[in-house]
């Protein structure tokens, strides 16, 4: 199957009627997670991410998903081992990837580059590339491209931030993204996207990503059945 790669702005969920409609439509585990959150924006992001995921799963034939955690604590489908998914959110954006191979995704709102963070967590080549940027805007874009790539890779492997970010290194060319890593021997492919002040990245194991597209979705138009 093709990787489904969707993103959405949760600003629509400030409409109370839409919020309640999607809240009633998502899984009970997602509703429980939302109920534990107090900050309004956190609730919007959690609902938006959950609704986007369940709409993508419905397109893959999973209409009533049940969720669990794998041995690394990564969320997974409890009864659909052939499908993998990952979620991310930042600012007002939610990002979702669904695939038949291990997959990781990350979105970050682009702000000023954090050189102290890069010095501590990036490999030497990545840090030097940031220092060599022509200006602060270019440095910010590159910082968040590296960061989202690293997050997507760690999420695809299942290790998360328990594995040091400076133990692997990305080499970026105009038309290619190469990783030097010793986490495992699987081949990984990467794509990055930049849109409206956000940086997105996706990592997939065992498959190329040359033709993958990221699609913007309206939360108001998602097809979800009421639970």
Image (spheres, rainbow, N blue to C red):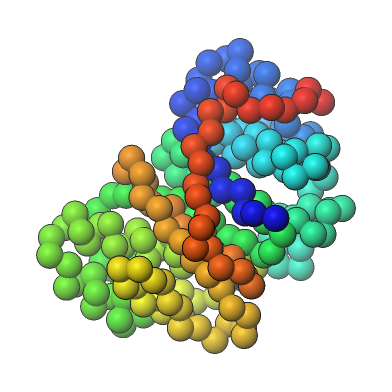
- Residue 21, compared with residue 93, is above or below; it is above
Rendering coords of residue 189 (x, y %)? 53, 70
Across the whole image, how many numbered discs are drawn on residues?
Answer: 0
- In-front residue for pair 113/134: 134
Quadrant housing residue 204: bottom right
* Residue drawn 24% across the image and 53% down it: 112
- Asked if residue 103 lies left or right of residue 81, the reply is left
* Residue drawn 24% across the image and 74% down it: 129
Residue at the top extreme, as displayed: 17
* Residue drawn 79% across the image and 59% down it: 82
Rendering coords of residue 221 (x, y %)? 60, 24
Look at the image and tell me in which quarter the N terminus lies: bottom right
- Residue 181, compared with residue 149, is above or below; it is below
- Residue 54, compared with residue 24, is above or below; it is below
Rendering coords of residue 10 (x, y %)? 50, 30
Rendering coords of residue 70 (x, y %)? 76, 63
Residue 190 seen anywhere in this rendered image of the structure: yes
Residue at the left extreme, as displayed: 134
Quadrant housing residue 20: top right
- Asked if residue 19 lies left or right of residue 226, the reply is left
Residue 153 seen anywhere in this rendered image of the structure: no
- Residue 5, compared with residue 119, is above or below; it is above
Look at the image and tell me in which quarter the C terminus lies: top right
């Amino acid at each position: 199957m093709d990787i489904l790669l969707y993103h959405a702005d949760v600003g629509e969920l400030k409409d109370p009627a839409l919020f309640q409609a999607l809240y009633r439509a998502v899984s009970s585990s997602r509703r429980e997670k939302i109920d534990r959150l107090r900050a309004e924006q956190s609730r919007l992001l959690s609902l938006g991410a959950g609704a986007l995921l369940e709409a993508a799963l419905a397109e893959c034939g999973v209409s009533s998903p049940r969720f669990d955690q794998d041995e690394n604590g990564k969320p997974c489908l409890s009864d659909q081992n052939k499908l993998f998914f990952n979620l991310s959110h930042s600012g007002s954006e939610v990002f979702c990837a669904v695939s038949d191979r291990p997959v990781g995704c990350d979105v970050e709102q682009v702000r000023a580059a954090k050189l102290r963070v890069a010095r501590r967590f990036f490999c030497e080549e990545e840090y030097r590339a940031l220092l060599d940027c022509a200006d602060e805007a270019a440095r910010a874009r590159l910082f968040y491209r590296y960061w989202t790539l690293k997050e997507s890779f760690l999420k695809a492997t299942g290790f998360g931030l328990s594995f040091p970010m400076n133990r692997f290194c990305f080499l970026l060319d105009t038309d290619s993204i190469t990783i030097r890593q010793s986490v495992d021997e699987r081949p990984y492919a990467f794509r990055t996207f930049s849109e409206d002040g956000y940086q997105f990245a996706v990592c997939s194991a065992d498959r190329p990503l040359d033709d993958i597209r990221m699609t913007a979705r309206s939360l108001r138009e998602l097809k979800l059945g009421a639970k």
